[in-house]
Amino acid sequence: SRLRIKLRCARCASGPQSSHLRSRYSAAMERVSVLARHFVTETSAAGSDLPGRQLTLTPVSSAQVIKNSKEAGIKARSIPSQPTTGQASVACWGERSFPVSQSDTALVIIDMQTDFLSPEGRVGQHYKDSPILDGLPGVERLLAACRKAGMTIAHSRSHRYGANVMDELVGTKDEGYELYPSCRARPGEIVVDKWTFGAFASTPLEAELRARGVERILLCGVLTNVCVFATASQAVDRFFRVCVIEDASAAFQRDWHDMAIKLISEPQRKRGHQAQVGLYFGEISTVAEVEKALSSIPPK
């Protein structure tokens, strides 16, 4: 059932603008925000003029929250301060490096859909003169290199359009929703459909990657400042090591792209975080460096 909050206070005779009521309201909202983080069930919205979803808040028991926290702690303690040695090493910004191998590294490509990339797309039509296609050649090159190297490849498609969740597009042949023609998935590659900005929170992507032994992610796609950034954060929350490929990612404004890359990469290089390769929140590299590293790995 929906969560409803009603505030009652006998001392609030002065009306809703009283400082006492505002204090009570603020305290209640803080409690709700804590509770909401443990409510996860979703249902389709009914009677709306626009397709979308609304959340039905279903409480998770405190015992389950404690269990999840303990499991996260066990997983965190199992992560070595340095990643396992890969078959090759990708040179990264700040004189750093990111190991890669066929067995435990995946290329994860975010939302390379016609709706975002085309000036006629549902989102792209609002940004006709944008640098959104800047990352496309890089994604095409990464796909070719990673396929040749025999690595795991995963694609996400988003049916989250701002405040709307258009789940009626999933499973259709809608051209706007589909992956851009040059970035289409091949048989055997992972494809997940998401309604959250990050690709992990609303999909089985983690389970798909774990089943293939993946521990590290080369991450690219669009939008750098929205879904790529959110996916990097969600991946790190799940203890995947991340390397964002800067020139295979793009946003609708260059400064948005640059700011996202800065926020992802600068904490990684700060004192105290430097041992945690790809975990605060990701290394940054280029397509050329990935191609160079993968060229030394014998194809499967």
Image (cartoon, rainbow, N blue to C red):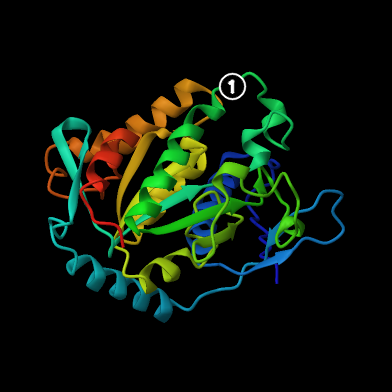
**Badge 1 density bin: few <14, some 14–19, many ≥20, Cα 10 Å:** some
Q: Write down the residue under mark 1.
A: 130
Look at the picture and state if 73 lies above or below 281.
below
Left or right, 33 with respect to 107, comes to right
> What amino acid is labelled 1 in the image?
Ser
Image location (x, y in percent) of residue 88: 18, 50
Element at label 1: loop
Quarter of the image for residue 207 reads: bottom left
Camera-side residue of 63 and 167: 167
Q: Quadrant of the N terminus?
A: bottom right
Look at the picture and state if 15 lies above or below 190.
above
Quarter of the image for residue 2 reads: bottom right
Left or right, 7 with respect to 93, comes to right
Image location (x, y in percent) of residue 3: 66, 65
- Please tell me which residue is depicted at 48% across the width and 79% down the height of the picture: 61
Left or right, 274 with respect to 101, comes to left
Q: Quadrant of the C terminus?
A: bottom left
- Please tell me which residue is depicted at 12% across the width and 55% down the height of the picture: 82
Look at the picture and state if 199 lies above or below 285.
below
Camera-side residue of 225 and 243: 243
How many labels, in total? Answer: 1
